[in-house]
Amino acid sequence: MPNPIWSGVVAFGMVSIPVRLYPATESKDVKFHMLHRKDASRISQRYYCPEDDAVIDAHELVRGYEASPGRYIVMTDDDFAAIPVTSQHSVELSEFVELASIDPIHFQKTYYLEPDPLGLKPFALLLRVMQESGRAGIARFTLRHKEQACVIRPYKNTLALSPLLYLDEVRSTSMLRKADRVEVEPDALALPTAYVDALTTEFNHESYSDPYREGLTALLDEKAKSLPADAGAKTMTFPDLMGALREAIEAKRAKVS
């Protein structure tokens, strides 16, 4: 389990449940590094300032908002901390809704909530109530300076928290062709409906794998067999400083003489 990225309390009526927040998902994509084609050495990325014509360190960076072309408002950590939010260390359940009433397009990412030992009993009570009622809780919480609406719902043996996109963050469908305005005769629905009914089953996520990742991994394993024995274990060589100094002195003496 990774380290928690947030800790606080879930407020449920008069009860405050201390919890920790963990990422619920992880990417399994095969990751690649950028290499120099010439010698297969790994390339390092650096921050370059064209104004100073210099490479700068990460600690010299600040965040800026482009107010107009070429004009930036610089923001510091203190600026972000000064923005008033009411959910810095708490998640207060303000209402409960049917989970089906929230379209999945609004879900950003999912996190797991884990109760502290002292909050295990009220956490279990909240989990059971939500499981039996079939409802999800709506709340607000702050993560990385940003306050967001979120939904809390039962997931297996715990509660999952998903920040919600706001309405203006979901693009309108108005620019798309209006398929719902096409007139469809009732008789035309019979055959496709029968086909859908024939293929209807319970969703089993385990039956779906990632063939591209499996094929890519197999290819990489095969290519790894042809690597030289010392590949990836390059030894660093250091210049002979004393020898270089002797050569420089001898060259200097040769010029003088």
Image (spheres, helix red, strand yellow):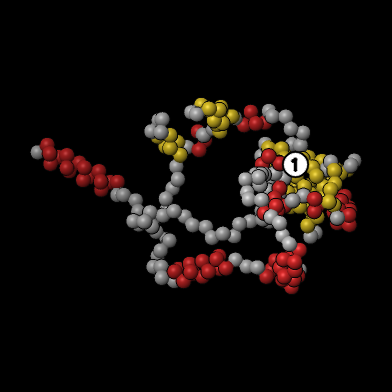
* 104 relative to 117 in the view: left or right: left
Residue 249 appears anywhere in the view:
yes
Q: Amino acid at mark 1?
A: Ala
Q: Quadrant of the C terminus?
A: top left
Picture residue at 60% right of the left edge, 66% below the top? 210
Above-or-below relation of 53 to 229: above
Instruction: Please rate how many residues cluster around mark 1, counting C-alpha atoms within 10 Å: few if below 14, some from 14 to 19, many from 20.
Output: some
The residue furthest bottom is 198
The residue furthest left is 257
Query: What kind of element bears circle 1?
Result: strand
Residue 240 at x, y = what percent? 29, 49
Q: Quadrant of the N terminus?
A: bottom right
Residue 123 appears anywhere in the view:
no
Residue 9 at x, y = what percent? 80, 43
Residue 33 at x, y = what percent? 47, 55
Picture residue at 55% right of the left edge, 66% below the top? 212
Above-or-below relation of 82 to 237: above
- Please tell me which residue lies in front, 139 or 236: 139
Picture residue at 48% right of the left edge, 28% below the top? 70
Q: How many marks?
A: 1
Residue 203: quarter of image: bottom right
* 169 relative to 252 in the view: left or right: right
Above-or-below relation of 144 to 68: below
Residue 63: quarter of image: top right
What residue sits right under mark 1 in the picture?
149
Picture residue at 83% right of the left edge, 51% below the top? 98
Residue 200 at x, y = what percent? 75, 69
Above-or-below relation of 173 to 186: above
- Please tell me which residue lies in front, 190 or 245: 190
